[in-house]
Structure formats: structure tokens, C-alpha cells
Image (tube, rainbow, N blue to C red):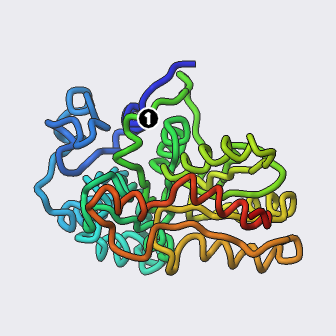
Amino acid sequence: MRTIQFREAICEAMSEEMRRDESIYLIGEEVAEYNGAYKASKGMLEEFGAKRVIDTPIAESGFSGIAIGSAMNGNRPIVEYMTFNFSLVAIDQIINNAAKMRQMSGGQFNIPIVFRGPTGSAGQLGATHSQAFENWFANTPGLKVVIPSNPYDAKGLLKAAIRDDDPVIFMESEQMYGDKGEVPDGEYILPLGVADIKRAGTDVTVVSFGKIIKEAFIAADILQKEGISIEIIDLRTIRPMDHQAIINSVKKTNRLVILEESWPFGSIASEITYQVQEQAFDFLDAPIQRITTADTPAPYSPVLLDEWLPSAKDVVAAVKKVLYIK
């Protein structure tokens, strides 16, 4: 099986779907002439032309609204944000138009649209460019939220998102675009709403998603040397969430740690914790532990940034805490 970069997997998914369906187009800042801010649309302008790969002004609210209107009229747009931090400029369009239009129109209008781009911290980008908003979007009925962690999942999930008849928030990472992974040559699609057990284990369940899951893998290798086996579940889709995969694992391991790159208040970890205590409370042998960023805006200093972000060290400590190992 061939090995390609995350950005190439994204580009392949969009290109294959655009070849299949002429109603699909890509719109956003620098997606055409510049081949994408992170080169995720490299070569697409040359293949599909300026009517289907469209550069826009720096006006997220404007081009998001145009795309939503075109989706109401039979097109299937892919909207790229240079970063989901900039989606805040268009959040009224996303939440009050895209997410609600099917219900408000009594089912007369579907909004088959994908909003995609990088999320979370990408190094020293400062407080306004290092935020994760998956819990904001996941709190909105009518939106689906997808966050892949590797090239294989990214391609299969993006193809599913493009074919979906509802609006999908598809979150990537600037720090993952160069990641390499095995991706099949042939056609494949991964269903939305299905988690994946990336590593089987028996002692503790660790649930995560997106690029921060890498810290769980590092921690798993460290803990394995100490005879501790952790099971790593990659959610892949935040909404709809595969609660059953988590419950099944907790019933096996009896312990749960949740790792995410977001602030603690109102987090995805909070939702998972509620679901587990409701459906599997009697199986828990220790209180659930969550690992998040610090409850502050992202710092610029690299020293402070390392402390602000979750790490493998934090995962190891949380796993040992639920195992009552000092």
C-alpha cells in the first residue's frame, strides 16, 4: 500500500469526488492560484478550472453565505477556512443558516456542504489562532463534526462528508498536513459516526481524537514497558458520537481517561463523562479522568505553550491515577 501525506489525502478526496459529481466545488482563501494555504488543493485549479476551484476575498462570512445559498440550489460546496479561528467571522452563517435551514424550511432545503480547515494549536501562533471549537459546533443540532487523526481516516471521512446531505464541520490541523500514512489506491469511504479502536488494551480506556491522539500513542508505549495495557479509541466523529464503542471498552477495562486539545469547561470530555456515568457507572473502578489544555488563552511563549498543551506525560499520570499507582 502506498504512503502519502495528510494534505495529499485531503486533496485526493476532494478531487475524486469532484470528478464524480459536477455539482461539487471548492471555495476559500488561496485555494486556487496558491494551491491552498497548506497545499491541500495542489493541482486542483489546473484540473477543474476557476469555476470550480474559487479564490475569495478575505471575507469568511461572505463566501460562507454564498456557498450555503448555492447548496440550497443544488450544489455541494466545500468551504475551506485558512483556520477555524477565522470561521468565527462566519459563525452566524454556519449556525443560523446552514445548521437550521432543513428544519426551518420544513425539509424543502438540504444543505449538503462541508466546512473544512485546520483547528487547534499549531505552535507559536498566539491566543487568537490556537483555539479548538469542536465543542461549539457539536453543540449545534443540524451540524456533523469530524476530526480525523491520520491520512487514511482523513480521505475516507472527507469523501463521506462530501456525500452527506447535511452540513459537516471537517477539522484538520496545520501540524498534521505533512504526516504520512498508508492510503489505498482504490475507492473507500468511512462512515461518519463510527469510532475506531486504534490500539487494543485491557487495563485502561483512553478516548481521544485529532492530532493530540499522538500523545496517547507515546504514552501507551511508555506504559507498556511497565506492564500496563491501554486501549486507545479514536472518535473520528464528534457528532454523531459513537457512544457505544466507548461504553463497550469501559465495560472491559473499567477505567477511562479522555484526552483532548480544548479547554476543560463544556468540553467533549464532559459529554463523554456524562454518557459513561449514565450507561456504565457500575463498571467503573475509578473516577473518570480528563486531560485538556489549561483553562487560559493559548500562550505565545514556547515554554508556556508546552505546559498549556496536553502531553504524553499527562496521559501517563492520568492512567496511573485511575489505576491507583503512585
Q: Residues within 10 Å of mark 1 (few under 14, many from 20)?
A: some
Tell me the quadrant of the picture where the C terminus can be found. Answer: bottom right
Q: Look at the image and tell me in which quarter the N terminus lies.
A: top right
**Residue reaching furthest to the left:** 57
For the residue marked with disc 1, what is the amino acid? Asp
Q: Position of residue 72 (x, y in %)?
A: 34, 63
Secondary element at tag 1: loop
Residue at x 49% of width, y 48% of height:
163
In the rendered structure, the answer to whether residue 62 lies left or right of residue 118 reads left
Image point (27%, 36%), residue name? 39
User: Which of the 4 image quarters holds residue 206?
Assistant: bottom right
Image height of 202 relative to 258, above or below: above
Q: Horizontal and vertical percent for residue 274?
A: 69, 79
Q: Viewed as shown, does residue 202 lie left or right of 300? A: right
The one of 239 and 24 positioned closer to us in this rendering: 239
Q: Mark 1 highlights which residue? A: 179
Residue drawn at the location 62% of the way across and 75% of the way down: 271
Q: Is 49 situated above or below 160?
A: above
Please report the residue visible at 44 percent of the width from the left and 64 percent of the height from the top: 110
Indicate the position of residue 57 as horizontal and vertical percent values: 11, 55
Left or right: 188, with 110 as reference point:
right
Q: Is residue 59 left or right of residue 146?
A: left
> Residue 162 location, x and y as percent?
45, 48
